[in-house]
Amino acid sequence: MRICMLVEGSYPFIVGGVSSWIQMLMEGFPEHEFFIYALGAESKDRGKYKYKFPDNVVGIQEIFLDEILRCQSPDLQENILSAEERQSLYDLVTGEKPIDIESLARLFSQGNRQKNPLSIFMSSDFFDIITQVYRSKYNHLPFTDFFWTMRSMLLPLFYFFNHPLPEADVYHAVATGYCAIIGCIAARLQHKPFLITEHGIYSRERETEIVKCGWAQGDFKSVWIQYFYNIAKLAYSSATMVVTLFEQNAVIEQELGCDPKKISIVPNGIRLERFQHIPELQEHDGPLMLGGVVRVVPIKDIITMLRAFLLVQQVYPDACLKVIGPYTEDKEYYEMCRQTVSTLKLRNVEFTGSMDVAEVFPLLDIVLLSSISEGQPLVVLEGQASRRPFVTTDVGCCRELIYGRSGDDLGEAGAVVAPMDYEAMAREIIRLARDFHLRRQMGNVGYERAKNGYTYENFINTYRDIYSRLEGVSV
């Protein structure tokens, strides 16, 4: 069976939770072929892979957003869409009612060369549709700004559709964004099943980013936010099955319009044997060692970690903090973090870059996670497999991993605080730092929780069943 993995902004160009998950998934199925359909931001990353592909990866198709700038606009065309096709595009933009995926699939069919995606974008039909949307929903905004906002939102999608869609037996997207729309169109054209695994809630993550961004202003933020919710709704409605990592995500997906009958919960899993050499936490004479294994990007909120560390150093002046993970993905944010270290006059802070976590965790007394959004972070499971206690923010599945699910009476594996609450994070770090026996107990609880419910074997066996159920299905 050939499985097309549709990814964006992650594998194989960026190291991190979702990318590591994809690598582990493919390694677990040597009997299947995998084809990677990867959407990236900048073409300079072409071929610069951060992972060694397993032998069962048979190919990769890379498409980058910045290549849009080099496209030549086709000539303006008049009235090239049918009434049905116009309605499909209108519904895609507004999200007011279920989208006719069959019509949308036919519209973007590679055999329909007269109506290629970029030609549609430059047609009078498109202008009329955007005008209609504007008059019905957004006429309080300046029309010119609205039109160009619509162009900016839709052009990537149209550009992606202008490339060949891969053939596969199953299409498997790892988010409900652009990659999911490509997946559902390809699956419908090939009459194959479409599977989504959602780690975090993609549309909500985009909302968080847009609210804080500077490139969208005022009411145009809400236009962008609604667009990503519309895309997610289309992905959910088109999917054969939607897999998520924990119960709260499933609840949110239903609230966003996903049929609960489609949803399955499959927790992440880790290879426990990778961490078997690490003993339980040991007392030592050196300084308190704190660390966060994390990409240095805004959604991980390293600034909160640094501000918390400032308060910790007032109690433990010799304490050390290691920020362990890649820092070249967002150079501006990395510089902001470095400037924060300087401004706060922090000592003993090191940005190490990527390291082998199995070598890092034995060095740490407490592990930190300060993200403002997560799914079910692999790093927490890996740290628990290493018997290390955590202080995390209350995002994604962190509360469940630290305190346990219903019926789990193992105890606490650390502490959970509100996102961006650096004072609470500092208090919990100091509380754990003062009590070695509590830290060791929490580390051992985390190990038992990972061993009981989050193993690689359970993860792979569950997906083996999912793929088996989808194999040969005609949609």
Image (cartoon, rainbow, N blue to C red):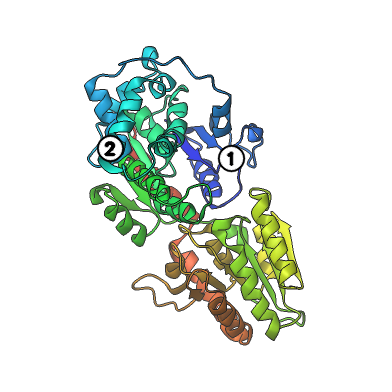
Mark 2 or mark 1, earlier in chain: 1
Left or right: 220 as drawn, with respect to 303: left
Circle 2: residue type: Arg
Vertical comparison of 15 with 94: above or below: below
Q: Residues within 10 Å of mark 2 (few under 14, many from 20)?
A: few
**Residue that numbered label 1 is attached to:** 12
Return the residue nearer the eye: 213 or 176. Answer: 213
Q: Position of residue 217 (x, y in %)?
A: 47, 50
Return the residue nearer the eye: 139 or 70. Answer: 139
Image quadrant occupied by the N terminus? top left
Q: Secondary structure at mark 1?
A: loop
Please report contact status of discs 2 and 1: CB closer than 8 Å, yes or no: no
Residue drawn at point x = 38 percent, y = 45 percent: 223
Vertical comparison of 293 with 416: above or below: above
Vertical comparison of 136 with 269: above or below: above
Return the residue nearer the eye: 224 or 190. Answer: 224
Residue drawn at point x = 67 percent, y = 76 percent: 310
Q: Position of residue 69 (x, y in %)?
A: 57, 28
Circle 1: residue type: Pro
Report how many numbered discs are placed on residues in the image. Answer: 2
Q: Position of residue 428 (x, y in %)?
A: 56, 80
**Looking at the rendering, which quadrant does residue 342 occupy?**
bottom right
**Residue that numbered label 2 is attached to:** 135
Q: Position of residue 135 (x, y in %)?
A: 27, 37
Residue drawn at point x = 32 percent, y = 43 percent: 138
